Image (spheres, helix red, strand yellow):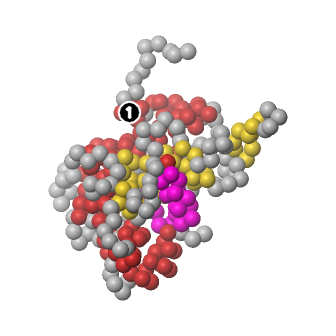
């Protein structure tokens, strides 16, 4: 399939390399404000990325003529990811922190690669924590695609009978901040859920283990998250409370879906593990004095 990297290499670079400017700078009639920042991995299918963006815009009531989605492939130059200046001065961070930005939409591939990439995890950190610290609350939402043949739905037939049928379409799904349930584009297919591979990878997110372009790039990202708690001569640790905060912010978003899936498929050991970790405590959940029947 054609991924975002292919679009960048074969299409975007042909127009932008000679000018040293982004594609948007070359073709836009004027300045554009980004309402949503798009966090993604370049190996994600371009077709599926468009499906996710269109469904998210539909859910959020966005007018695509005026409500912009900021995507690095089209809005940034390649050298913008270098460390010639502070991370806070990169166009990526500036787009998230801009006054017009509502939040970040992370678009997933089937392997949930963004949760294993340092830049993507950093973007979630900027969105959920750094912006909040300076009084600019941003929402963080995740989109994925349910691929054909990977899930079953509850089909209701005209005669009143029903049965579980394999779903044979590609369909977008979005996990929105504040929603108690997953949003699936096909509302008639009862029983579909957010892709389990994405949920599992999300619950395993560890920013210290995430990958970057190179060791220096990764170290700079981790030092940024540590917020000056290390001197230049000190090595970046594998574990730190600041890293735990970043990881927990992602775990919290998926904890409810993960617990639902584990209970749905009778994964008792996973239910126990999820209840034993402190992610639900950090969400403000409290132990009930008496069981609810």
Q: Quadrant of residue 25?
A: bottom left
Position of 19 compared to 182: left or right?
left
**Can residue 263 be found in the magenta stretch?**
no
Pointer 1 local density, CA inside 10 Å: few below 14, some 14–19, many at least 20: few
- The structure residue drawn at horizontal position 40% and vertical position 35%, both measured from the top left corner, is 279
- Asked whether, in this view, residue 26 is left or right of residue 145, the answer is left
**Residue 36: where, in percent of width, then height?**
38, 56
On-image quarter of the C terminus: top right
Q: Quadrant of the N terminus?
A: bottom right
Q: Is 170 rendered above or below residue 192?
A: below
Q: Is residue 188 above or below residue 69?
A: above
Q: Nearer the viewer, residue 184 or 257?
A: 184
The residue located at (24%, 51%) in the rendering is 226
User: What residue is drawn where x is 30% and y is 52%?
Assistant: 126
What segment carries the magenta color?
38-58
Q: List x then y, in percent, for residue 92.
A: 32, 63
Q: Is residue 47 magenta?
A: yes
Point 23% across, 45% down: residue: 135
Q: Quadrant of residue 111?
A: bottom right
Q: Can residue 45 be seen in the rendering of this structure?
A: no
Q: Relative to the observer, which residue lies in front, 232 or 139?
A: 139
Return the residue found at the far top: 290
- The quarter holding residue 268 reads top right
User: Which percent across, then down, holds residue 195?
Assistant: 58, 48
Label 1 belongs to which residue?
283
Q: Residue furthest right?
A: 159
Q: In the displayed orientation, state which residue is furthest to the bottom.
A: 18
Where residue 136 appears, as percent x and y from the top left, is 26, 47
Count of numbered badges drawn on the protein: 1
């Amino acid at each position: 399939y054609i991924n975002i990297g292919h679009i960048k290499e074969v299409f975007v670079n042909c127009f932008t390399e000679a000018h040293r400017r982004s594609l948007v700078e070359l073709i836009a009639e004027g300045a554009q404000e980004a309402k949503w920042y798009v966090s993604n991995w370049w190996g994600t299918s371009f077709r599926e990325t468009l499906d996710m963006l269109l469904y998210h815009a539909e859910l959020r009531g966005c007018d695509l003529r005026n409500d912009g989605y900021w995507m690095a492939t089209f809005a940034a130059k390649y050298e913008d990811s270098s460390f010639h200046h502070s991370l806070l001065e990169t166009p990526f961070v500036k787009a998230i922190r801009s006054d017009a930005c509502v939040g970040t939409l992370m678009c997933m591939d089937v392997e949930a690669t963004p949760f294993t990439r340092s830049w993507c995890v950093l973007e979630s950190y900027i969105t959920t924590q750094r912006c909040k610290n300076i009084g600019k609350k941003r929402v963080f939402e995740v989109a994925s695609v349910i691929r054909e043949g990977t899930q079953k739905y509850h089909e209701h037939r005209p005669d009143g009978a029903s049965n579980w049928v394999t779903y044979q379409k590609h369909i977008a799904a979005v996990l929105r901040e504040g929603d108690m349930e997953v949003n699936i584009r096909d509302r008639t297919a009862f029983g579909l859920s957010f892709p389990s591979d994405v949920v599992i990878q999300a619950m395993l997110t560890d920013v210290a283990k995430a990958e970057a372009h190179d060791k220096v790039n990764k170290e700079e990202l981790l030092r940024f998250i540590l917020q000056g708690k290390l001197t230049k001569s000190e090595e970046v640790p594998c574990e730190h409370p600041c890293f735990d905060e970043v990881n927990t912010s992602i775990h919290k978003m998926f904890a409810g879906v993960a617990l639902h899936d584990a209970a749905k498929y009778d994964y008792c050991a996973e239910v126990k593990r999820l209840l034993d970790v402190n992610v639900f405590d950090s969400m403000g959940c409290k132990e009930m004095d008496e069981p609810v029947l």
